[in-house]
Image: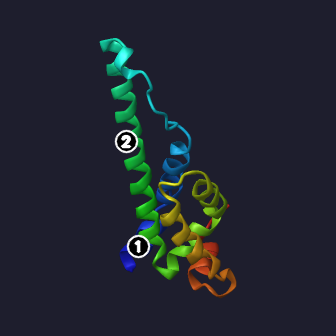
Amino acid sequence: MTTRVSLARHPKLIMRLVGLLTSGVAKYPRHSAPGIHNTTTSETQQLTAGSSAERNQEKITKLAALTLSNISLAPSSRAYLKPFERDLFVVAATDETVTKYLANILNELVSYDPETDPERQAMLNTSTY
């Protein structure tokens, strides 16, 4: 659990993982390539490269979601995830490839009570604005 909390405490880790999730939403729309047999070699290569980029983006998005899901298992890390709850909800509602992972995170955040969390109190006491 301490590794998960240490990761959550990293200043920009959660922000960057959520950024990876949001950048993958609708970036590569799923489409079939009807009539691919009528295309030239260069057009076929472009379609193949596009689908490869789509698969890579999907892998990156899934890894970011799994990492956040793993971090959210530690109760102390929820204070760091709570500010991104809205972004996680939007991605969960729009990207079916990561919905089940983000639903787990959102479920963990529902039971989070910021008033009784000592990690949040420590976070507020050490932050400088």
Q: Position of residue 12 (x, y in %)?
A: 50, 56
Three-letter code for the amino acid on which mark 1 is drawn: Arg
Q: Position of residue 104 (x, y in %)?
A: 52, 72
Q: Position of residue 119 (x, y in %)?
A: 56, 80
**In front: 66, or 32?**
32
Position of the N terminus, as image quadrant, is bottom left
Seen in the picture, residue 5 relative to 98 is either above or below; the reply is: below
Q: Position of residue 101 (x, y in %)?
A: 48, 65
**In front: 17, or 69?**
69
Q: CA distance from mark 2 to mark 1?
A: 28 Å
Residue 103: quadrant of the picture: bottom right
Residue 108: quadrant of the picture: bottom right
Residue labelled with disc 1: 4
Q: Residue furthest bottom?
A: 116
Three-letter code for the amino acid on which mark 2 is drawn: Arg
Identify the residue at horizontal 61%, vertical 84% (top origin): 117
Identify the residue at horizontal 66%, vertical 83% (top origin): 113
Circle 2: is it few (<14), some (14-19), or many (20+) Cα within 10 Å?
few
